Image (cartoon, helix red, strand yellow):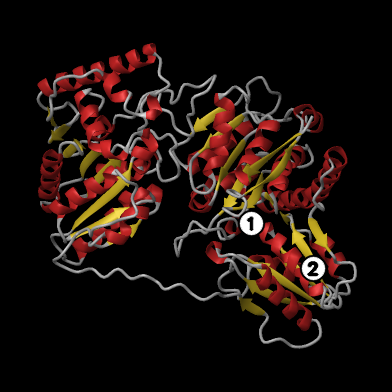
Amino acid sequence: MPTQDVMTGNKAVAHGVRLSRVQVIPIYPITPQTSIVEHIAKFIADGEMDAEYIHAESEHSAMAAAIGASLAGARVFTSTCSQGLAYMHECVAQATAYRTPILMAVVNRTLGWYWSTGPDYSDMMPEMNLGWIVVSVESNQEALDTVIQLYRAIEDPRVMLPAMLSLDGFYLSFSSERVEIPDQEEVDEFLPPYRPRYRLDPESDAWPTALLARPLHTRYRMVYEEVMRDSLHILEEVDGEFGKRFGRSYGGALDTYRVEDAEALLVTMGSMTTAARRAVDAVRKSGVKVGLVRVRVLRPFPSEELKRIVEGVGAVGVVDRVVLHGTGCGNLCMDVKSALYGMDGRPRVVNFVAGMGGQDVSVEDFVGMAKKTFRAAWEDVDSDVEYVLREEELVRRTVRLKGRYTIYPGSLGCAGCGASIILRNILKVLGEETILVIPPSCAIVNYSDVLGVPYMLANYASTASFQTGIIRAHRVLGRKGVKVVAFSGDGGTVDIGLQALSAAAERGEPIIWVCYDNEAYMNTGVQRSGSTPAYAWTTSTPVGRVWRGKAGVRKNMVLIMAAHGVPYIATASIAYLKDLRRKVEKAVELVEEGVGPAYIHVQQPCPTGWGFPPERTVEVARLAVQSRMWVVLEVDDGRLRVNVKPRKVPVRDYLMTQRRFRHLTDEEVERLQRIADAGWETWMRLETMGRLPWYT
């Protein structure tokens, strides 16, 4: 029997994935998408779902893993948004060439410039030409149902195309509604197991190929476009059959409202449509005959269906949450104009651009749009494109008071945040002639407003490349004495940022890299990183009947950097601040001599993510060192020295201060004790070697 529950849009998507019996899920966290894969992780950890869950080190790799899994014959899901979708762009394009029926949820969020975590469609629209089916949903119930519908459609042998499920970040992802969860047996009857004709398997009779055949490119694109166009009918068939079986359908490609006698139409997509419906009802009461069309299937665009609906209508008002810069209108408006261009007696098309960066589009806003569209059916209006603006907020400007502070009092950081301690101490040494390069992290969110030195927000995967560009420009312009310093969390260091950091190390760039390691992706809500210790609970490695927290041990960044021959490498702790400052001084000496890079890795206990009272941050940091779970050392020109050799305390004393380890059994605690002891013995042996063998 179906059940009902109140849930967010992201949880509704996760339930849809569970009910669809997805087999492989590659993931990488980014707000506001992340809780989808957190819910899926919980299903798997508790034994409610049987699937391979891949902790990728970046969105690019997540999509690559998705393509590989789909080619091998599995049902695959992933999700992302914004910068993450842009980063995986290369692989997103590749998915179409192989005809992989991957489903990806895109939880819309502003892309790039004018930084915002609010929703608009600037992330998804650049991907619209890559050959993916794209479906936009209005409600949480539709999100769950569309997951199931899309797997049925895209795995159809007549289709075999990847699909994006678009849902508005925050408005749907984190808002709760009542949702009916279908019965698993009914879903199984509607959605059979995936049985691809072609798969990467030596036992298969045929396997997929993407030919490097330039002369055939135009022909392949033509065939692909025919398949894409034909898939529209299959999407509509699936929606109709879903409605008969489950009692809910969504209009196929276009969802209409009060269009029968309409003299003008609003055209929308996504969650804003709910407010638009109320606006239509409001203006109808005053005799303004306006209807509504929600574009549900954006690719393939339902041009013929739209022409049939608008026939006899005087004007169409298209509401866009994105601008197609250089064309004077939004993306949806451009699609509508293109569809209607050859139509006899086509209606006038006006465009409203609203809600960029997540700004709310109210019922009152839609009332104004409806009235203007209705006027446009009968008379000239001021402009065919209108930006729906609100009173602008004042833009805060940070004035740098040279010679006073490198970091000012106060911040948005959580109580007990160790990053604040690290920043204040390293900037005390670095001084004013410093440029900070900070990737997405707690640091950029919580401390950028109080910095008294120049800084920039870098792309997550390319922080060291930004540093390289800055330092090379200062060199060619003859500017000396400027330190270019990365301040990055562990995810931006050991995972997605490692490739660029490795390249900068290989080139010997005279930069400083400070990793503040809180041992998880804290900024997006405590997901596992490559620096998360074994058995630690995170939201993407939850503890359940099947899972016991993180499987596997953390990456050893000291040895990774040593393998590059980095001239100065150090670890540090906020419990030993004099040692930290000395190491920053050493790093400054090196880069001022043109030698680099210098790499400093500081453990930063996180009260929020680790689960301890904020007043115990420094105490927890000290216990980490005393238990030898965190070793304070340095590698100076290949010579390794352990700087703090404490009187040993049991690992249990450190672990039990934190909620993330409270689930551990005695056997698991003992294993962590063995890992700590073995690590300590290794460092002691390396210390006695003199110069490490990787240095020449």
Q: Is residue 496 left or right of residue 20?
A: left
Figure quadrant of residue 149: top right
Amino acid type of the residue that numbered disc 2 sits on in the rendered structure: Asp
Q: Which residue is mark 1?
A: 129
Please state if 433 lies on the left or on the right of 187 as rendered.
Answer: left
Figure check: 54 above or below 355: above
Residue 303 located left or right of residue 431? right
- Percent from the top left, x then y, of residue 560? 28, 32
Numbered label attached to residue 281: 2
| Image mark count | 2
Q: Is residue 56 above or below residue 80?
A: above
Can residue 531 be seen from the camera position used here?
yes
Q: Residue at x 81, y 29 (%)?
A: 189
Element on which disc 2 rests: helix
- Label 1 amino acid? Asn
Disc 1 is placed on an element classified as: loop
Q: Position of residue 148 (x, y in %)?
A: 73, 38
Q: Residues within 10 Å of mark 2 (few under 14, many from 20)?
A: some
